[in-house]
Image: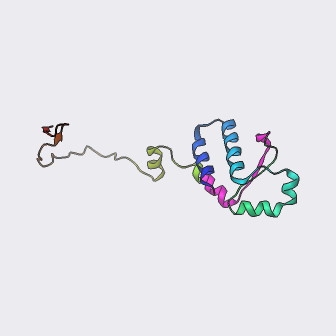
Amino acid sequence: MDARLLKKVQMARNASRQDITESLVESIVQIGGGPLTVRKAKDELSAVLGKARNGVPQVIGNIKKADDMAVVISVKDLAELVTAARQQETFGEALDAIGFRPYSGGRIIVGQGRKRERLQRSNASGAKMAL
């Protein structure tokens, strides 16, 4: 599966349906070449399926009617697209996905750490200043 298409799917989470359709058609046409007519796809079905199985999606239909087009992709690539689409967007979603639950017990008392020297910061002239 082409990484450009996976990226488009990941970025489409918040896009409108029309924007998603146009973006996917554009990407798939760039990857797989121009759209095929229904007649040509029917006549060359073995070649169309072979390309799809090799990770090159095939678009069938009229490019001027993006909503009326069809795409032929392998099941393996479809699974990859679904995985890309559902990837977590936020750190919280990633924590939820792995089953993280915050501590809900009583108060935790943490003792003061050992004494350390104060940090020193250099200014532009090279002299050190205490923080």
Residue at 78% over, 45% down? 69
The quadrant where residue 77 appears: bottom right
89 relative to 38 in the view: left or right:
left
10 relative to 54 in the view: left or right:
left
Residue at 45% over, 52% down? 99
77 is higher (above) or lower (below) than 7: below
Q: Is residue 67 magenta?
A: yes
Q: Is residue 51 magenta?
A: no
The residue closer to the viewer here, 40 or 87, is: 40
122 relative to 94 in the view: left or right:
left
Disc count in the image? 0
Q: Residue furthest front?
A: 125
The percent position of residue 126, horizontal first and vertical second, equals: 16, 40
The residue closer to the viewer here, 105 or 113, is: 113
91 relative to 4 in the view: left or right:
left
Q: Which residues are magenta?
A: 64-82
Considering the image in quadrants, where does the C terminus appear?
top left
Considering the image in quadrants, where does the N terminus appear?
bottom right
